Amino acid sequence: MCPAMCGIAGIASRDGRPVAAAELAAMCNAMVPRGPDEEAYFLGSGVGLGLRRLSIIGLEAGKQPVRNEDGSVVVVMNGEIYNYRELRRELEARGHRFATDTDTETIAHLYEEKGEDCVKDLRGMFAFAVWDEKRRQLFLARDRIGIKPLYYGQLGDRFLFASELKAILALPEVSRELNWRSLDHLFTTMTTPAAESIVAGIHKLEPAHTLTWSGRGALRKQRYWRARFVPDYHRSEKDTIEELRAQLEESVRLHMVSDVPVGAFLSGGVDSSAVVAMMTRSASQPVKTFSIGFRESSHDESAYARLVAEHLGTEHHELILEPDASAFVEDFAWHMDEPFGDSSALPTFAVSRLAARQLKVVLSGDGGDELFAGYDRYVVEKRERRRDAIPQVVRGVFGGIGALMPEGMKGRNFLRHLALTDMERCRDAGMLFRVDSRRKLFRREIVEQIESLDEFGAHEEPDLQAGADWLSQFQRLDLERYLPLDILTKVDRMSMANSLEARVPLLDHKFVEFASTIPTELRMRGEETKYIFKKALRGILPDEILYRRKQGFAVPLAAWFRASLGEMVRELLLTDSSRSARFVNPDYIEKILAMNARGRSMDLQLWTLVSFELWCRRFLDGLSTEAVKVNDDPGLAHMAVSQS
């Protein structure tokens, strides 16, 4: 197997205008950490494809771009196709001749056979582009869950795509105008929307979608897969447990296929511990595991990670982070590519850097909460549904009272939340700034810009699954929105910043499809989350791990902002040098800081503002295509005070 993580990029011209090699080089130079080992290009008539490659094995056979036999199909890919050997055997039986042993070449021949439907046969994490010379069209595809990113835009007669937004911004023709819808979405959910970037005119290809650009400039986008929660009541609980163990072990084993050592992130939670437990069954030597801890006991899980490591016999490595992220913060915007409000990106960067010093590949436990109902908000929603028996008119009165209470007053959010329906509660629970707060946050002229789009108070209506119960609806929304927009974005950007490949076996689409058949009452029993997943792991992991209270991968930023990082926030947001002051109201930021100082946790609001400010400084003021060197150590030396 010759897989590789890459940064891919391309340009296609409707009028056949040649693509300059220097343009592709500028795009690829912005993505060096995704592929520090080599770069390569394909230049054709009116088209150019480029990539930066992180070689997992380093064989010549793994080079890209790759072509079919007659050179009419050219492919560049970022990712892994785990079933490529099986597909290759089938294709060879149909007469296809392979020139390499790479999984990318499988896509070229599969595209010859099945055209745009080729993506349905692929099992893996990927974002790829196929140039079809005969049809003069470009075909893009992104994996089902959204593990690997892909941006694109059509500017005049040219179509552009890349693994990262900054690669597209490296071209001078791309205007750096803010997308007001994305700005509003950022301060609502901490992320930009699924189909749009923070820059006007540059889009994201959504998970489980393909996009075809023709030489006439037409775009056609299609969804090719969607998870559906359909319970299978023919299996007993015992049979479900046995099948779950088998499916988990098979997926982890598949994700461990590599000629280089594979390690794992280990938080001490159920999901990452389950993945490591299955890894130890296949590994011929102790698995290397990596974790992050904090001095603040309220956020520290390092003792649980050590417990699991000792129980499973792993070679464990640990970092303890201190509240000094200032050195890394300067490069945060470059690595994240877009403004991003989830502060757990900081420890994700640190644990990725720790692992990258020894390995090129790690497995992570992301996805377990979405598949097996692990979030505390599901328990909260179950409790709140009991209040739905209260007449709506009465709950509406309480909601009105809450709306009249001063912002930050205890009980305000509870009363406002009481008046909402279940889907409204689902949206409201994850809101960073609600509508009234966003109107205060943004400057008046920005509010007018956003209101001209009818965005304030508007929500993208969820695509509900007919006949599904409320828990399945909530999980599906998290699987399609929160997971790819937040969790997977964070892991991809922070691991790739360190030239580290992170694989996610719980999100193998076959495993997702199986988990979606588990009945609701086995996913959450009473108020016990992940009921069946924990049962399947009894005897494999200690009960102390399986049944402890969930903490989550969070940073004690609220306390840090009250102490050593407070001055940094003021320097970024409230001085004359602040770039985001063109968009947000400094008086309201002062109010947020005051609420945080009084003990009301406003860490995510402040971090989102910091992230936006850093992005404005890096990208709105001018873009340098000189990538951050992955051998440098920005921030980690300051953040880490002990290592074992």
Image (tube, helix red, strand yellow):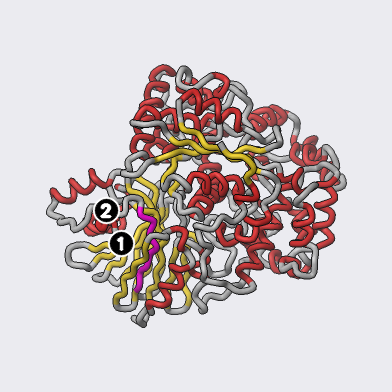
Q: Is residue 458 above or below residue 378?
A: below
**Residue 580 % position (x, y):** 72, 66
Identify residue type, mark 1: Gln
Callout 2: helix, strand or loop?
Answer: loop
Q: Residue at x 23, y 43 (%)?
A: 86
Residue at image mark 2: 102
Q: Which residues are magenta?
A: 48-55
Identify residue type, mark 2: Thr
In this view, the residue in front, 622 or 384, is 622
* Tag of residue 167: none
Task: Find out whether residue 202 is within the magenta segment.
Answer: no
Closer to the chain start, of discs 2 and 1, is 1
Q: State whether residue 248 appears in this view.
A: no
**Residue 150 % position (x, y):** 45, 59
Q: State whether residue 346 appears in this view.
A: yes
Q: Residue at x 37, y 35 (%)?
A: 251
Q: Say few, some or many: other residues with alpha carbon within 10 Å of mark 2 (under 14 / 14 to 19 / 20 or more).
A: many
In the rendered structure, are the residues bearing label 2 and label 1 in contact, judged by CB atoms less than 8 Å apart?
Answer: yes
Q: Is residue 92 left or right of residue 430?
A: left
Q: Is residue 316 above or below residue 91?
A: above
Q: Residue at x 47, y 62 (%)?
A: 151
**Image label count:** 2
* Tag of residue 64: 1
In this view, the residue in front, 284 or 395, is 284
Classify residue 633 by image quadrant.
bottom right
- Magenta part, dominant SS: strand
**Residue 302 % position (x, y):** 60, 32
Q: Dividing the image into 4 quarters, which one contains the C terminus?
A: top right
Q: Is residue 332 left or right of residue 113?
A: right
Q: Is residue 262 left or right of residue 369?
A: left
